[in-house]
Amino acid sequence: MLLAFSSITILALITLFIFREGAPLMARVGLGNFFSTEWRPGEGLFGISLMIVGSTVVTFGALVLGVPFGLACAIVLAEMAPDRARTLLKPVIEILAGIPSVVYGFIGIVVLLPWIRSNLGGPGASALAASLILGIMVLPTIIGISIDALQAVPNSYREASLAMGATRWQTIRRVVLPAARSGLVAAIILGMGRAVGETMAVIMVAGNSVQMPRSPLDPVRTLTANIALEMGYAAGDHQAALFATGIVLFAIIMALNTVANLARGRRVKRATAPAAGAEDLQAARDDAPQGESPPGAPGVTGTQRP
């Protein structure tokens, strides 16, 4: 109990510290200044809107890549692959989550940026490069949670669909995926949170220019990159503005995690909801008065009881 509460206490202290350092500046300069498009801390302008746009663009691009590939991989591993292939491939995919983000960023600098610069144009470091790197980094989160959601669907659903004459793909598309929808949504939202909170890899490949991106090949700066790049030399209101940026990030991540937990909770509640079995129906029939139908058994009268 002491260890459990210690982790909660540490989280509460971190939250209190961030809000204590950043909230006064937000109140003093006003939300209009803080959410403007002008980031010039030396002149008293602390607008983070362009960084919010940069984070949104990069996260959306990562989901465009990660969601289709992640869900497709999860469907294959959970529903189609033989047990030996699943046993081999799932740990390999989970290794992707253990690779340090700086390694992804270094691969992006060495391989991805020169390819973009040579084939697509632009400086190379761009929103597209950051989206591609993050799209790979969110795959373990999306795949792992999606596999758990698909495997939580009762086998009786699949057997009933196949017994009705449906093919395996029809069963997956019409039965399994709808039944696992809340878990799949949770996987996507948690993957989104992973993309929003990533820092090092984004710093290395995004270009870090505070501007409105006009195309995927333009450099961008995200909220996390802004904090990491300027915290080393910031002081006074500048430092407080970076803590205020952390408050915005904190709120975004908490909202995403809350939605994901609610979605997963719906799936667990639906999966564990009690259902009337054959024994319950038989007991209801035995207890029903002569000539009446028990609940859940329309048309069964006393004269028709076995």
Image: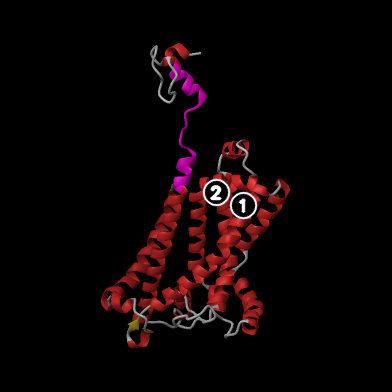
Image-quadrant location for residue 137: bottom right
**SS under mark 2:** helix
Q: Is residue 236 left or right of residue 207?
A: left
Q: Is residue 243 left or right of residue 187?
A: left
Q: Residue at x 65, y 58 (%)?
A: 93
Q: Residue at x 63, y 39 (%)?
A: 165
- Determine the main secondary structure of the stretch shown in magenta: helix
Q: Residue furthest bottom?
A: 43
CB under 8 Å between callouts 2 and 1? Answer: yes
The residue where tag 2 is placed is: 177
**Disc 2 residue type?**
Leu
The segment highlighted magenta reads 265-285
Rendered location of residue 94, percent (x, y): 63, 58
Using the image as rendered, state which of residue 122 and residue 204 is in the foreground.
122
Compared to 10, does 306 lie above or below?
Answer: above
The residue where tag 1 is placed is: 75
Q: How is the image coloured?
A: secondary structure
Image-quadrant location for residue 130: bottom right
Using the image as rendered, state which of residue 290 and residue 203 is in the foreground.
290
